[in-house]
């Protein structure tokens, strides 16, 4: 089986500053970091490091080849990534002050300019039993979800960042709806009748995660593992990618939840986003020392 991920690719530029700049102020940074991010890229890195065949569908500008090299190095199939000459690669300008308070500018760029005809052609290879992952940082989610479902694949949709119109457009094609607690609260407020999907995966930070099978009413609870967190960026993406890979590899829901929780716990002990997602071997070693 395989995982297909229509997902955002962002370059994260992180600047350390004495304070966040005021209007009209010019401020020199005393630190700079460059990293790979984007919810989509993070989920693909997680799924590939978990050991699943992972095709990334998405778009970038014509340059920034190091990004593709890094995705390749994570084991991701990158051949379907669209290179759009008139678009900038998606990027985030992240400002951090001395207290780690932040201000962030995101330019979606190529992520929101996906060529739908080409995407549909690339998705022709998706097979029954495959999984399609989607989040809210690209264009063309409904088209991809519809095409995948028509071919018998399951669709796991992360409703993040939360956007009600985007959620409503994709929901008819979704199998599993994935959210964090804040997004789940927004969904419940906007849709008291429920989302009408097969299952919901809700992550709750240090409180763990739960999987609600809406057909049977069964609820699986997965506690978080106890770690000292240093950076929770990408925790949800790591969880979603590892959970999908677990299902893809035939684990049952409880096993996939434990695997994903172990991966996300390790991620939060490391600074960074995509680059900080642990390998399957690291996760297995971590889980071997945890209570059942
Ligand atoms: N402080 C933490 N300690 C251990 N695990 C954590 C911690 N924060 C997050 N996680 C793990 O990451 C998962 C996703 O985190 P969460 O904050 O819910 O998602 P998001 O990153 O989307 O906001 C949690 O369900 C948990 O397994
Ligand atoms: Mg969170």
Image (spheres, helix red, strand yellow):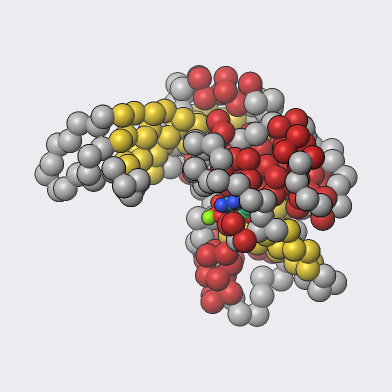
Tell me which residue sits at (73%, 58%) in the image.
Answer: 222
Above or below, comparing residue 31 to residue 24 in the picture: above
Q: Nearer the viewer, residue 15 or 120?
A: 15
Q: Is residue 210 visible?
A: yes
Q: Is residue 167 visible?
A: no
Instruction: State the image quarter where residue 245 is shown.
Output: top right
Instruction: Report the quarter where the N terminus lies.
Output: top right
Q: Nearer the viewer, residue 43 or 224?
A: 224
Q: Is residue 273 left or right of residue 107?
A: right
Q: Is residue 88 left or right of residue 207?
A: left
Residue 276: x and y in percent read: 56, 33
How many labels, in total?
0
Tell me which residue sits at (69%, 25%) in the image.
Answer: 75
Q: Nearer the viewer, residue 283 or 246?
A: 283
Residue sticking out furthest to the bottom: 193
Q: Nearer the viewer, residue 121 or 19?
A: 19
Residue 240: x and y in percent read: 67, 48
Residue 94: x and y in percent read: 36, 40
Residue 284: x and y in percent read: 77, 36
Tell me which residue sits at (59%, 40%) in the image.
Answer: 267
Tell me which residue sits at (23%, 45%) in the image.
Answer: 20
């Amino acid at each position: 089986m395989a995982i297909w991920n229509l997902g955002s690719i962002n370059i994260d530029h992180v600047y350390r500053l004495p304070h966040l700049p005021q209007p009209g102020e010019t401020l020199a940074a005393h630190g700079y970091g460059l990293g790979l991010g984007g919810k989509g890229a993070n989920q693909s890195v997680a799924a590939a490091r978990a050991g699943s065949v992972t095709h990334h569908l998405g778009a970038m500008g014509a340059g920034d080849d190091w990004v593709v090299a890094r995705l390749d190095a994570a084991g991701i199939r990158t051949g379907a990534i669209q290179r759009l000459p008139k678009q900038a690669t998606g990027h985030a300008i992240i400002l951090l002050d001395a207290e780690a308070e932040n201000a962030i500018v995101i330019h979606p760029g190529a992520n929101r300019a996906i060529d739908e005809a080409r995407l549909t052609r690339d998705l022709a290879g998706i097979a029954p039993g495959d999984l399609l992952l989607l989040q809210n940082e690209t264009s063309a989610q409904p088209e991809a979800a519809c095409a995948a479902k028509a071919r018998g694949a399951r669709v796991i949709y992360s409703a993040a960042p939360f956007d009600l119109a985007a959620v409503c457009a994709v929901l008819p094609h979704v199998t599993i709806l994935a959210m964090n607690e804040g997004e789940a609260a927004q969904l419940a407020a906007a849709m008291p009748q429920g989302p009408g999907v097969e299952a919901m995966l809700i992550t709750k930070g240090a409180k763990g995660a739960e999987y609600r099978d809406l057909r049977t009413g069964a609820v699986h609870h997965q506690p978080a593992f106890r770690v000292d967190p240093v950076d929770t960026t990408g925790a949800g993406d790591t969880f979603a990618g590892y959970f999908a890979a677990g299902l893809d590899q035939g684990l049952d829901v409880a096993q996939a939840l434990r695997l994903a929780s172990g991966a996300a716990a390790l991620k939060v002990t490391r600074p960074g986003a995509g680059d900080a997602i642990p390998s399957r071997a690291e996760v297995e070693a971590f889980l071997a020392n945890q209570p059942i």
